[in-house]
Image: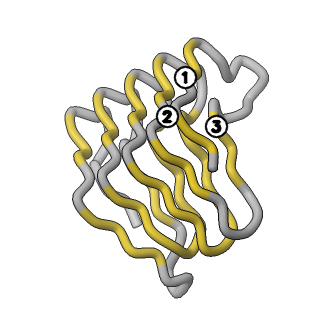
Amino acid sequence: MFGENVAIGNGSNGNDAFQLQGIGHTLIGNKAVNNARGGFGISGENHTVSGNLASGNLQGFALSYSGRFEHNGSVSNKLDGLVVNAVGLGLVISDNEVLSNGQPSLPI
């Protein structure tokens, strides 16, 4: 489990504040705030991503994985709040708040 971490002011090297890959990880209760690139970039299989916050980043969450994405918040990011490239992967998205981002809230 990867939880209760904070990333502030990162990403000048072109990386997301939190980058999760692989199989079967849990990401709970983390915050990515005011990062130069994305707050969270998540790819792989069978991850659980819950209770995380992305705010003030270039992009909030980029999702390309199977598993669950629930109870997360993406607020006031400069571009997209939530980008989903998980068609056919079996990603369940529920009970999230995507508010006041600079681009359309849910491009799929």
Residue 73 lies in quadrant: top left
- Seen from the viewer's position, the closer of residues 94 and 26 is 26
Secondary structure of the residue carrying tag 3 is strand
* Crowding at mark 1 (Cα within 10 Å: few <14, some 14-19, many 20+): some
Vertical side of 90 occupied by 25: above or below: above
Q: Is residue 68 left or right of residue 37?
A: left
Secondary structure of the residue carrying tag 1 is strand
Q: Is residue 53 left or right of residue 5?
A: left
Vertical side of 43 occupied by 74: above or below: above
Tell me, yes or no, whether the two marked residues, 3 and 2, touch with CB atoms within 8 Å. Answer: yes
The numbered disc on residue 24 is: none
Q: Residue furthest bottom?
A: 88
Identify the residue under disc 3: 18
Residue 108 lies in quadrant: bottom left
- Seen from the viewer's position, the closer of residues 44 and 5 is 5
The amino acid type found where label 3 is placed reads Phe
Identify the residue under disc 2: 30
Identify the residue under disc 1: 6
The amino acid type found where label 2 is placed reads Asn
Vertical side of 12 occupied by 52: above or below: below
The amino acid type found where label 1 is placed reads Val
Residue occupying image coordinates x 47% and y 29%: 31
